[in-house]
Amino acid sequence: MAQEKIILGIIPARGGSKRIPKKNIKKLGNKPLIAWTIDAADKSRLLDDVIVSTDNQEIQEIAERFGIRVIERPKILATDWAKTIDVILDVLRREGADIVVCLQPTSPFRLAADIDNAINLFLHRKCDSVISVCESKREHCWFLRERKEYIVPIFGHKYLGMRSQRLPRLYIPNGAIYVASAETLRKYKTFYTDKILPYIMPVERSIDIDDFDDFVIAEAMIKK
């Protein structure tokens, strides 16, 4: 019998934040922002283990209160310029895992079912990675950008004359879930490979908290 693969959830959560001071521990509703992601990960049926990578004592205490293991993040990986993939690889250098599920703490409304559905998609379809997305407006096919003194269509001229109903569907990563094998991450150092499958989430569960306006929207959604 083949050995079952170890599926590791990693929550990268540094203490600093430019736009919102101490963002990951700021209260959203009745609990710190990171606690929403920890709670969803803890309820997942497919994650074998969950680790929080952090440089912050308060974040560590919150994680340990939930019974989640913590890895101390090196200071060089806790700067504004540090990349999430380097944090993931740092964890993989210390922990054994076959499959990695990255869960950013800025996506509070992702459910445990979303995590498990994305993992199942990865396990049962041929792909290098699975990334959660939400549908974007089709009219974005009409986007223009500057080129010297002119503006030109990003996706070419063929969409400019189309009615919006005929435009292709577009998706945007929502930052909630990233799934890939440890082997793929070590090889390519990214979740954005040539063979990505989308896990499509509704807009209301796709909010990614980046600034104070996002917090206001999230609070309103909770009250509603």
Image: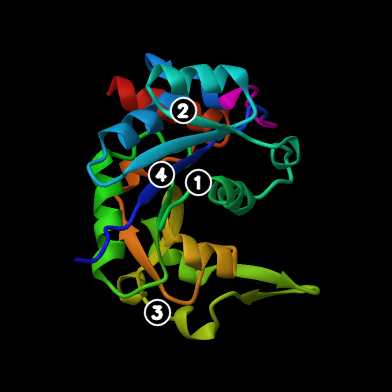
Range shown magenta: 17-23
The residue drawn where x is 76% and y is 40% is: 76
> Left or right of 89: which side holds 149?
right
Graded by Cα atoms within 10 Å as few (under 14), some (14 to 19) or many (20 or more), the crowding at tag 1 reads: few
Q: Quadrant of residue 221?
A: top left
**C-alpha separation, residue under disc 2 versus residue under disc 1:** 22 Å
The residue drawn where x is 24% and y is 53% is: 117
Give the residue number, with chain letter if any, for mark 1: 95
Q: Are marks 4 and 1 in contact (CB under 8 Å)?
A: no
Q: Look at the image and tell me whether residue 178 can be seen.
A: no
User: Which sits earlier in the primary sequence, circle 3 or circle 1?
Assistant: 1
**C-alpha separation, residue under disc 3 versus residue under disc 2:** 43 Å
Give the residue number, with chain letter if any, for mark 2: 34
User: Which sits earlier in the primary sequence, circle 2 or circle 1?
Assistant: 2
Q: Are marks 3 and 2 in contact (CB under 8 Å)?
A: no
Tell us which disc is closer to us: 3 or 1: 1
